[in-house]
Amino acid sequence: MKINPYLRLITSVWMVVSAPLYAGALSPVDGMRDMRYSRRTAAEAVRWQHQLRQQCIELLHLQDLMNLRGQLPLRIKRCAEADRSGYRMMELEIAATPGRRIAVVFTRPSQGAGPFPAVVCVHGHGGSRHVVYDVETIYKGFAHHLASAGYVTISTEVGQHQVFEPGRTLIGERLWDLLRCVDYLRSLKEVDVQRIGCAGLSLGGEMAMWLAAMDEGIAATVSAGFLTLMDQMEKNHCPCWKFDGLRQRADWPDIYSLIAPRPLQCQNGWKEPPSDFVVSFARLAMAQVRPIYQDLGRPNAVELHAHCGAHEIDLAALMDFFDRTLRVRP
Ligand SMILES: [Zn+2]
């Protein structure tokens, strides 16, 4: 869709002028955000995380599957394999639920027996499980670069807009499929379960946030092209991020706060279109993520990386982050 340039200019002026409104409790929907994080002791912060995580599991209609986590067989089928530069790439199928299977791409380094660090790589709207390996895209082939650098990688599809199984939710099914990728990684002796991370761009940045928020075993997260406030996404965005009850509980900084104190890098480009994931909104959102990292004693574990690009991965920053957080065994 083409956007009128005057409208674009007006929107961008409005975003700058109105930005301070979003910083505090002045947002009209904020009054409903009853789980908004505020400073507290470390023990209370952990309790708050547990409470919000539990509420999200219920809103996402995932309680029954979460109860079965670790018991559901993976029923792995190998479909194809090929050698790439420094790694072996496999096309697999695994069971997501007892009645539904998903296709995944899995890579492991050609040399060595591990245990290797691993990263769940997540694509955005219009993408596929393969696109994160493609160096000619906005993803910069980050999954390929991680695979070449000695990480195990895995990728599946999260771009669907229909709910597959009755009684589920869209975000719940997307998240569950990523959790199953993690289950697969944890089943492998060549993966170091203490060093499993995730990364994604756009919808992939959103789903990387959800994955790390809901699975406390995710050790490090890169969420690119997504950090903002929900008010900003009410217009000009595909509404697939929304589900019943979410806005009444939380805003994105609260969901990111579930990742604390584990390392988190958010990336936002200075050339993002004004109606998208602009740095000014990312800064406002990040100011609401930092408090829980302070309360949990790891203020430096969270970073907002504002880069010179647009809606894209900053590859060097991503590789550097995982080198610092996952490459070396703690
Ligand atoms: Zn969508």
Image (spheres, rainbow, N blue to C red):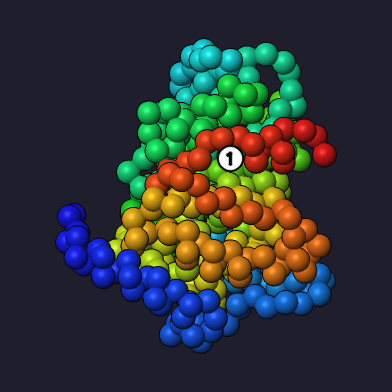
Q: Position of residue 212 (x, y in %)?
A: 62, 52
- Location of the C terminus by quadrant is top right
Q: Secondary structure at mark 1?
A: helix
Side (left or right) of 126 relative to 29? left
Pointer 1 local density, CA inside 10 Å: few below 14, some 14–19, many at least 20: some
Side (left or right) of 173 relative to 70? left
Q: Kindly identify which residue carries mark 1.
A: 317
Which residue is depicted at the point 70% across and 73% down?
48
Q: Position of residue 90 (x, y in %)?
A: 51, 22
Report how many numbered discs are placed on residues in the image. Answer: 1
Mark yes or no: residue 236 visible: yes
The quadrant holding residue 254 is bottom right
Q: Position of residue 7 (x, y in %)?
A: 21, 67
Nearer to me, 60 or 246: 246
Three-letter amino acid code at the position of disc 1 = Ala
- Location of the N terminus by quadrant is bottom left
